[in-house]
Amino acid sequence: MAAHETVQQEVDLNDLEPILEGFKEEKWALIPLLQQVQEKYGYIPPDTIEPIARSLRLFPSEVQGVVTFYSQFYTTPRGKNIIRVCRGTACHVRGSGSVLKIVRQNLEIEPGETTPDLNYTLETVACLGACFLAPTMMVNREYYGKLAPPRVMSVLKQYAPSKKEEEHGEG
Ligand code: FES
């Protein structure tokens, strides 16, 4: 497995100002403010922690603590397509291990990671609530079940960046 580098992304902090303005010095507003920041950037960029803390008159460590505590907040960029491979018992006995292996090998990322082109994020979950489809995975809001290896490959291809996007280096 190739060593994975953390995805880095340039962040325009000008986009942060209007969000901070809406919550000036309102300590109670940390969570709704963070939700808006995540809506804007897709995650909570590390560079936003300090300005958020200053604006709410908190310590940066307090803001960081909340971001780390709540699983709804992401500290690294997320991919355009979120792939969730089920690791529950029903899926496990029907071969979810192979499904996960194929996804990991094809995308060259581990669960919890995002591809450098920001096209895919891979996650594993305890049950997708569709055990009758085992082994199951989801891409964004779509379910894919009774997965055999060739089918996994074709699902991944379906969400590959288009040639045009690749040529222009856009996600
Ligand atoms: S165990 Fe996989 S969907 Fe329930």
Image: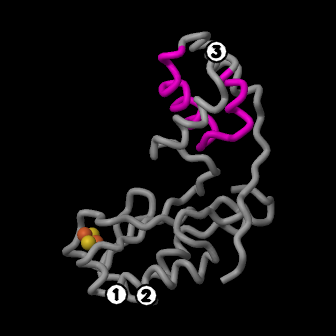
Vertical side of 112 occupied by 49: above or below: above
Query: Magenta span covers which residues?
Result: 27-53
Is disc 2 in contact with disc 3, using a CB cutoff of under 8 Å? no
Asked if disc 1 is less than 8 Å from ligand 1, the answer is no
| Disc with the residue nearer the chain's start (2 vs 3) | 3
Nearest to viewer (mark 2 / mark 3) = 3
Residue linked to disc 2: 98
Q: Name the residue under label 3.
A: 57
Image location of residue 29, percent across then percent down: 50, 19
User: Which of the pair 66/89 is nearer the observer?
Assistant: 66
The answer to whether the residue labelled 3 contacts the one labelled 1, judged by CB atoms less than 8 Å apart, is no
Label count reads: 3
Secondary structure state at the residue bearing disc 3: loop
Q: Identify which residue, 118 or 33, lies in the foreground.
A: 33
Look at the numbered discs 2 and 1 and tell me whether their residues touch, using CB distance below 8 Å: yes
Asked whether residue 72 is drawn in magenta, I would say: no
Residue drawn at x 79%, y 44% is: 10
Q: Does the magenta stretch include residue 42?
A: yes
Q: Which badge, 3 or 1, is on the more N-terminal residue?
A: 3
Determine which quarter of the picture holds residue 58. Answer: top right
Percent from the top left, x then y, of residue 67? 55, 38
Mark 1 lies on residue: 95
